Image: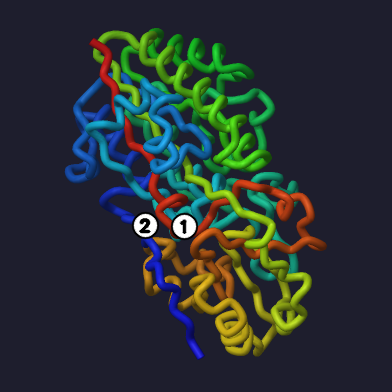
Amino acid sequence: MTHEPRQLPIVPSYGTAALADLSSSMLASLDPDAPAGQNVLGLPEARRACLLIVDGLGWELLRDHPAAAPFLSELARNSKPITAGFPSTTVTSLGSICTGRPPGQHGILGYQVIIPGENRLLNGLRWDSRVDPRQWQPLPTVYERATAAGIAAVHVAQGSFRGTGLTVATMRGSDFRPADSMGALAAQAATALRDNDRAFVTVYHGDLDGTGHMFGVASDAWYNQLAHVDKLAEQLAASLPSGACMYVTADHGMVDISPDDKFDVDAHPELRSGLALLGGEPRARHLYARRGAAADLLATWRDVLGDRAWVLSRDEAVKEGWFGPVDAAMTSRIGDVVAAAAGSFALVATKAEPRESRLVGMHGSLTPSEQLVPALMYTAA
């Protein structure tokens, strides 16, 4: 029996209004020789542009907290959200931003996905030294494309991210500039913009996401951190050279999950029957079946979860456009079954994933709280 959640999933607007379209449009706005139609968001022409990526700043969260973020909220007044992509998680969204392509093409398809041909998962944040990030994500990055067009390409982020597997996979070709504080982030980005006649600069800040995971997005801790992020954006805007554009977006939103809404896969052996590997994360699961068990696995998960999750086969998820156009080489990375949580529900695994299971704020699915992210713009006078 198939159960349909009462709420419909938000299928990402790939090709018209998704994260990949924002970075592609930015690059096209800087390059007068860009192919026609590449600037799908219709961004204004400029010689310098900066993209501030605030990890975890969902559109609905920003909209609901104008007092904590007056600068960003003012920019949002005349703005519309865009969609993150699926799964709505950091590694996948950074892949989309930094390649200008949807997940089904860049292949970074979730927090934990199978390494085809091997009975193990690749954690996209922690990576694995046995996996070459250049082969795992083979497309040219927006930084490589910018450099080829004569545009300085700079990425500003925490210094410990330099040289990691995810950074190499998504940000190769950039001039990586370390910045371990908010003040340094704004200053490094401003310097990169001032020192180059034509520049494409990205700035990544991750503390809001970490605060939400630990304390929840309804906490004073998250609210206080948002105020700091607002000041970062304001300082960065004030330091822009004349005519430069600043854009602000996020990789995903976030929802708080109460203990009662955490469904422990490890406590339900029927969900483990026929399951070879449990991938993804609590709000967006890739289920890799044992040989011949995919159909039974799909039926069991649908029956047990009912309307608490959207549970699709791999072919159904691809057909529905969850990952955008999927290259044949990337198909096998997708779970035989894909489960996306509806409402405030999470599929934790307390034995296999104790750290992830304890989090308060989570993301990854296709709800408005997770999918809708800002696409704000500020132009320096």
The type of residue carrying mark 1 is Phe
Q: Identify which residue is drawn at 36% across, 15% down.
A: 237
Residue corresponding to mark 2: 12
Image check: 370 left or right of 180?
A: left
Residue 298, position as x, y percentages in the image:
57, 83
The type of residue carrying mark 2 is Pro
Residue 153 in the image: above or below residue 82:
above
Residue corresponding to mark 1: 86
Q: Are marks 2 and 1 in contact (CB under 8 Å)?
A: yes
Image check: 363 left or right of 317?
A: right
Residue 225 in the image: above or below residue 105:
above
Residue 177 in the image: above or below residue 134:
above
Secondary structure under tag 1 reads loop
Q: Identify which residue is drawn at 55% across, 81% down.
A: 302
Tell me the tag on residue 366.
Answer: none
Residue 330, position as x, y percentages in the image:
51, 64
Residue 175 in the image: above or below residue 139:
above
Q: Identify which residue is drawn at 63% across, 34% down.
A: 211
Q: How would you rate the neighbour count of disc 2 (Cα within 10 Å): few for under 14, some for 14-19, many for 20 or more?
A: many
